[in-house]
Amino acid sequence: MESDRHSRSASTTGVRFAGAAVAYAVAGAVHLVTAGLFLTGLRLTVLGFRTFFQPWIGLLLLSMALAMRPRPGRLDPDAPTLREADAPALFAVLHRAADMAGVRRVDTVQCTADFSVSVVRYGLRRRCCFVLGLPLWAVSSPQQRVAAVTQALGRSAPRNVRDGTFVGMALRSLRAGSHAVQEGEPSATPLRINAVALGAAAVADGTRRFDARSRKSEWLLWIPRTVLAATARLLLWLTEPAARRALFEADDAAARAASSQAALAALRDRRLARAISVEMHRLAIEKRTIVKAHHPAAPQDDLWDMVHAHAARLRAQDMPQPSGPDAPSGGPGSTGNDSYALRIERLVRAPQCPAAITLDGPDLARVQEELRVPRQTVAQRVLRDGVQL
């Protein structure tokens, strides 16, 4: 029995490494094709003026190569950004969580109005930015915050090749290329031509020719669109074992850092995402209409308190676990709708761990004070623009 278990483990490890190797090969082919498109397009554009069509083909290839160019990532210029000197207490918690997860420490923190926490890489040096969703931070208990932070940091481990530099850039290139050649949306209202109007026959004939050319261009774009989409699906399938393993290891790190109970509670609270977003949008409309009409100078700092109270009411109602396509799946590294329940089941069956990192007392007060200005900035933006549902 012991030998069977070891053989299954070795077989699983071999399959995982083989899938990662093939994923790197496919990603390398994507980068080579992008470079080939750029060089061929440049050559046809610069040296192809002997005929009429070569420069135009070159420009088409150059536009495709530019759409699929590797993107190193960048910070959101509109999101409040914190450096370690601005928030030493918050960064101390993030650094301890990163050490528990065995990943690189973060360089910056950006605050958003999303019900999520994640890690993004930016710049040519691939610096690490922690994206902190203030709604999730507002509704979570201190230990749940530690668990959510550790889970997000653990998903960015180098063993998760899907979010790595080489394969991750290839996936982003494929998505950008698919978006560049995606099918245009049909017109909602067809053109109506008055049959007795002057030049009606010419207008109708021109419309038919335009529609015919549009259909031909769509057929021409169908081939690259299909190839790009199929390659992206292949990369996702090849990296699924690594992404799933990274999710499980991130959950284990969160249980060690914040306690098993806090990690479970953080996972279960992901079901609140849709309801919290709807409530924030409702509060934004209410603040702009009813409250503004009766109290023009009413303070806007109570948004996060209202969000916290709404989450407490939802928990008291014992919301059912979601099971449809809107079910939370654990973030960017998720591999499917079933991973959410599977991750909870793993933590329930695993040995229970005590908390190694605690966020309470003076540390919690310092972190809250460091987030005071970003909380106000994001709250003002939410109340001004609402929330995208």
Image: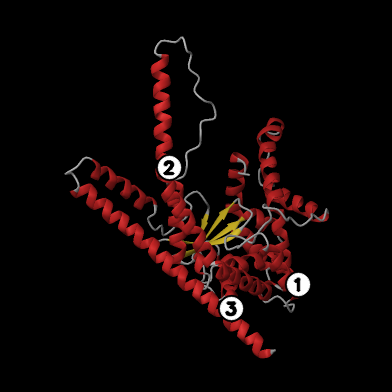
Residue ID for mark 2: 219
Tell me the CA gap for discs 2 and 3.
42 Å
The amino acid pointed to by label 2 is: Trp
Residue 354 spot, x, y in % from top left: 73, 77
Residue 388 spot, x, y in % from top left: 60, 44
Query: With respect to residue 116, does 22 lie above or below?
Result: below
Q: Quadrant of the C terminus?
A: top right
Label 2 vs label 1, nearer the camera: 2
Residue ID for mark 1: 348
Query: With respect to residue 51, does 292 lie above or below?
Result: above
Q: Residue at x 57, y 63 (%)?
A: 333
* Among the two numbered marks 2 and 3 on one chain, the one whose residue lies closer to the N terminus: 3
Residue 217 spot, x, y in % from top left: 40, 39
Q: Would you call the spot at circle 1 few (<14 residues within 10 Å), some (14-19), or many (20 or more)? A: few
Residue ID for mark 3: 12
Q: Residue at x 54, y 75 (%)?
A: 16
Query: With respect to residue 177, does 215 lie above or below?
Result: above
Taking the image as shown, residue 129 lies to the left or right of residue 116, namely: left
Q: Secondary structure at mark 3?
A: helix
Q: Nearer the viewer, residue 255 or 341?
A: 341
Tell me the CA gap for discs 3 and 1.
23 Å
Name the image quarter holding residue 298.
top right
Taking the image as shown, residue 185 lies to the left or right of residue 144, namely: left
